[in-house]
Structure formats: C-alpha cells, structure tokens
C-alpha cells in the first residue's frame, strides 16, 4: 500500500454510518407498521405526504418521498385500490393527478403517527435531551450544507 493510499475503512465513513443507521431504523419501522397496520413504510410515507400537502401532484410526491417515479406510481395505484388515497385530475392541467387521503387514509395516518411517536421516543431514549437537540442541529446543518453545495454545483453547470 502506498503512502498516499487512504487508511480508512468504509465502516469509518460518516455517510456509510448514517446510511446504515437509516436502513436499520427503516427496516425496524417497516416491520412494525406491517405487523401493526398492514402497511409498509414506503406506502405510509406516501400517505403521510398526501396528508401533509392535500392535492399534491405525483411530481411533488416524488420530490418529497425521494422515491423513483415508477415505484411512486405503483404505490399510489395500490393505495388508491385499497381505498386509502384518492386521485383527481388536475383542474389547471388535466395531465396531472392531485392526491388526497380518503377518510380511511386519514384515520390510518392518525393512528400511525401516534405509534410512530412512541417508536421515535424508544429509538432516541438512549440519548439525553441535550444529545437529541445537538443531533437535530447537526442534521439540519449538514442538510443545509449539502443543499447549498448541490445548488452551487447545479448553478455552475448551467
């Protein structure tokens, strides 16, 4: 190995550690929601965003949920068939679909938020309140820096 070769293991990279933690929490939460409510985490996120922004478009949902277009479209179709999500043709643009929760979808989202709060408290219970606040600030700071970097990189290629 040359003197210039990196000495770090992939296990030491912050991005890997954050991704690993994220995957572990998603797997745990998804299993919980599937057992408790019969719905996976991706489906639940679609419903929660539809509840957060009633009438949102598929494009906006993709942006918020960070899912691929085909995956998102399939999730929306499945949720509509289950009677949890309603699709309406856009008034301004008939090519767009606006998404709304049905009453059953609203009830499910409300129930899952109650249980989700409990899960989050359990997950964070190993940290002190000060550590939770510090972690929250660090996540916000890193997110803002990455957004600024991406916007700067996008602006320089225009």
Image (cartoon, rainbow, N blue to C red):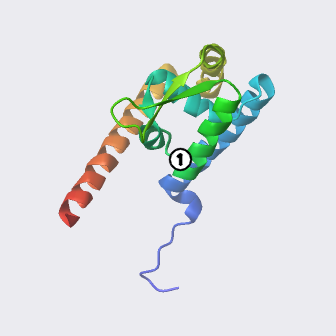
Q: Residue at x 56, y 64 (%)?
A: 10
Residue 36's image quarter?
top right
The image shows residue 90 at horizontal and vertical percentages of 41, 32
Determine whether, in the image, residue 74 is placed left or right of residue 5: right
Determine whether, in the image, residue 153 is placed left or right of residue 76: left
Residue 16's image quarter?
bottom right
Can residue 156 be seen here? The reply is yes
62 and 81: which one is in front? 81
Q: How many marks?
A: 1
The image shows residue 107 at horizontal and vertical percentages of 64, 13
Can residue 25 be seen here? The reply is no
Secondary element under disc 1, as helix, strand or loop, is: loop
153 and 137: which one is in front? 153
Q: Residue at x 46, y 79 (%)?
A: 5
Residue extending farthest bottom: 2
The image shows residue 111 at horizontal and vertical percentages of 66, 14
**Label 1 sits on residue:** 67
Q: Residue at x 72, y 30 (%)?
A: 39
Q: Residue at x 37, y 36 (%)?
A: 140
Quarter of the image where the C terminus is located: bottom left
Q: Is residue 88 above or below residue 11?
A: above
The image shows residue 132 at horizontal and vertical percentages of 48, 26
Residue 12's image quarter?
bottom right
Q: Is residue 67 above or below residue 129?
A: below
158 and 26: which one is in front? 158
Category of crowding for the residue at label 1, using alpha-carbon neighbours closer than 10 angstroms: few (below 14), some (14–19), many (at least 20): some
Q: Is residue 30 above or below residue 17?
A: above
């Amino acid at each position: 190995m040359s003197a210039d070769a990196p000495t770090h293991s992939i296990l030491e990279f912050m991005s890997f550690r954050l991704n690993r933690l994220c995957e572990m929490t998603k797997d745990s939460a998804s299993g919980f929601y599937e057992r408790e409510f019969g719905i996976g985490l991706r489906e639940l996120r679609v419903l929660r965003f539809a509840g957060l922004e009633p009438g949102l478009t598929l494009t906006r949902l993709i942006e918020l949920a960070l899912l691929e277009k085909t995956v998102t479209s399939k999730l929306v179709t499945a949720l509509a068939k289950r009677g949890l999500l309603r699709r309406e043709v856009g008034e301004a643009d008939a090519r767009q679909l606006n998404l709304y929760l049905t009453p059953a979808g609203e009830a499910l989202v409300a129930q899952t938020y109650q249980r989700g709060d409990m899960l989050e408290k359990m997950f964070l219970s190993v940290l002190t309140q000060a550590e939770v606040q510090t972690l929250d600030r660090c996540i916000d700071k890193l997110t803002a820096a990455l957004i600024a970097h991406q916007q700067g990189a996008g602006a320089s290629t225009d």
